[in-house]
Amino acid sequence: GQNIDQPTEMTATEGAIVQINCTYQTSGFNGLFWYQQHAGEAPTFLSYNVLDGLEEKGRFSSFLSRSKGYSYLLLKELQMKDSASYLCAVRLHGSGNTGKLIFGQGTTLQVKP
Amino acid sequence: DAMVIQNPRYQVTQFGKPVTLSCSQTLNHNVMYWYQQKSSQAPKLLFHYYDKDFNNEADTPDNFQSRRPNTSFCFLDIRSPGLGDAAMYLCATSRGGGDRNSPLHFGNGTRLTVT
């Protein structure tokens, strides 16, 4: 089976840094994605890692360790609009070339003033 | 702008009454996906198409069917909706073709209510 674990909820203060962890045990691995989802809206793509290490994109960074089955999303200089659910997703080797994504249940981040 | 469009945004149907959700894309992506997302849960993959090749997840109920008449359009048919089928249904696309860093692009979703 596929297993992707994230904390259910986190709270942080505006202007601070927060790290959201994700661990995975999947049958195959073809990349890890982070998505942001505001309540009632569709997920939007934040970052992608396929090799070990850190990928930085403005205020957002994502890290991957394939040997540990571990990733984190780092959000710096938090803003109120960052309050959302953050979904970790693993791409499996799909039939043909589909590479389907399996999602974790998401971490709801609340940013407080 | 190129995008993934889902209609309607909100859909109400009666218990047992067939309903169809639609999705269109202007990205010309090979792969189209349907996910079901219930409140505070992970999006759950129902099925996906690579071009016209259909891939059903093993645990997708028979009550759910899909059609992809051409590259741009994909439909989700729920033959006899039950109360447990109330959820947000998300359509997504990706380039596929072994492009493993191609992210999924999601539509805004259709929130289905079953009365």
Image: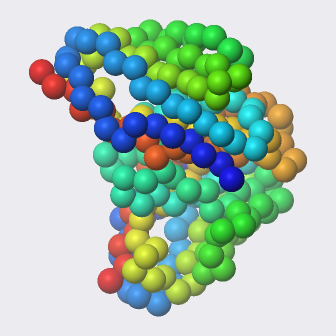
Quadrant in the rendering for residue B61: bottom right
Q: Position of A105 compared to A26: left or right?
A: left
Point out the residue furthest to the bottom here.
B16
Q: Number of numbered discs present?
A: 0
Task: Give the answer, above or below, for where A8 lies relative to A70.
Answer: below
Quadrant in the rendering for residue A60: top left
Whether residue A94 is visible, yes or no, is yes
Task: Give the answer, above or below, for where B26 lies relative to B56.
Answer: above
On the rendered image, what quadrant is the C terminus of chain B found in? bottom left
Picture coordinates of residue A83, whole percent (x, y): 27, 31
Q: Position of A80 compared to A2: left or right?
A: left
Whether residue A48 is visible, yes or no, is no
Q: Nearer the viewer, residue B36 or B65?
A: B36
Point out the residue furthest to the left here.
A113
Point out the residue furthest to the front here.
A68
Task: Give the answer, above or below, for where A72 lies relative to B55.
Answer: above
- Describe the colour scheme in one phrase: rainbow
Residue drawn at x 20%, y 17% as measured from the top left = A14
Residue drawn at x 30%, y 32% as measured from the top left = A10
Picture coordinates of residue A40, whole percent (x, y): 33, 50
Picture coordinates of residue B100, whole percent (x, y): 75, 31
Quadrant in the rendering for residue B109: bottom left
Q: Position of B86 compared to A98: left or right?
A: left
